[in-house]
Amino acid sequence: MTHLINTPQMKRNILLLVLLCLFTCMALEASTPRKRILCIAEQGTPHQGFCDAAKAWLDKHKEEMNAETTWVADLSKVHKDFFKQFNVILMLNYPPYSAPHAWSEDAARDFERYIDKGQGNFIGFHHATLLGDIFGAGDMWQWFSDFMGGVRWKDYISTLTDATVNVEDKRHPVMKDVPDTFLIEKDEWYTYDKSPRPNVHVLAHVDEHSYVPSSTVRMGDHPVVWTNERKKAKNVYFQFGHSASLFANPAFVKMFENAIRWAL
C-alpha cells in the first residue's frame, strides 16, 4: 500500500511549483512578439459599415491571436519600407488606383516588393479588384491587375443581390470548416473582362443562376475567392465585402478568421 505524506512543507512545495509554472508561462507569453496587422480602410464610403464591423471583430479577437492592429485610411503619403513592418495587410475597402490616386508612388512600389519578396502576407476584399481607368482612378496599375489574376473591372450588379457560393478547394486553410455551399446576402457582385482562373488558384465561385433578384450582369465562369500562388506572399482575395451584415454570416466569419490565422 502506498502512503501519501501530506505535510505543511509538502503543501508549500507544491504551491511554489504551481506558481513557478504559472510565472514561466506568463513570461513566455510576454516574450512572444505580437503579430502586426495593417488594416487599410477608406473612411466615409458606402462600405464604412463593413469596415466598422471588421474592426469590431478584430478588436474582440486580436488578443487570442496574439496580434495588434494599425488602421490607415490614406496611402497617398506612405513612405518607402512602410509595409514590411507588418505581418499581414488587410485591404478592406481600399481601391488599387494608380499613383497619385489613392496610392503614392512610394506606397505602390513598396507594396509590390512586400508581395513579390514575401515580406508579409495579404488579405483583400471587394474593392481590391477595382482595376482599370474607372472612377477617376488614373491608368491601370498593371502589377496589381496581374496580382489579381490579370483582370480588369468591367461591371457590377448595382442592386444588392443574394447569391449562392460554391467552394472548390475544401483542403485550403481558408476554407477549413466552411460549408461546401453557402449563401451571401445583399452584396455587390463584380464582373471582369475575363475570368482570373488561368492565373490564380480558385477557392470558390458564385452560381450566377442563383442571383436574387435575377440579373443579366454575368461573366460565365465567375470566381469570387482566390489566391495567387505565383507570389511569395500568402494571399487571398474575397470579391464580396460590401455590407456589415457579412459579419452575421457564419460562413463568411469562418473564412475571415481562417484567412487571418493562415496569413499570420
Image (cartoon, rainbow, N blue to C red):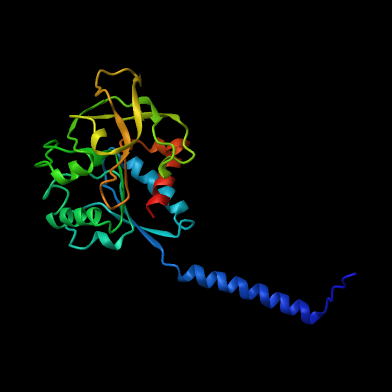
The quadrant the N terminus occupies is bottom right
At x 22% / y 53%, what residue is drawn? 116
Residue situated furthest right in the rendering: 1
Residue 256 placement (x, y as % from top left): 40, 44
At x 29% / y 24%, what residue is drawn? 159
Residue 41 placement (x, y as % from top left): 28, 48
61 left or right of 136 in image: right
- When the figure is inspected, residue 34 is found, relative to residue 202, above or below; the finding is below
Residue placed most toward the observer, 240 or 159: 240
- When the figure is inspected, residue 217 is found, relative to residue 179, above or below; the finding is above
41 left or right of 24 in image: left
- When the figure is inspected, residue 243 is found, relative to residue 260, above or below; the finding is above
Residue 102 placement (x, y as % from top left): 17, 48
The quadrant the C terminus occupies is bottom left
Residue placed most toward the observer, 27 or 199: 199
Residue situated furthest bottom in the rendering: 9
Residue 96 placement (x, y as % from top left): 19, 44
252 left or right of 99 in image: right
At x 28% / y 59%, what residue is drawn? 119
Image quadrant in which you'd find residue 246: top left
What number of labels is visible?
A: 0
Residue placed most toward the observer, 262 or 257: 262
Image quadrant in which you'd find residue 67: bottom left
At x 25% / y 40%, what residue is drawn? 127
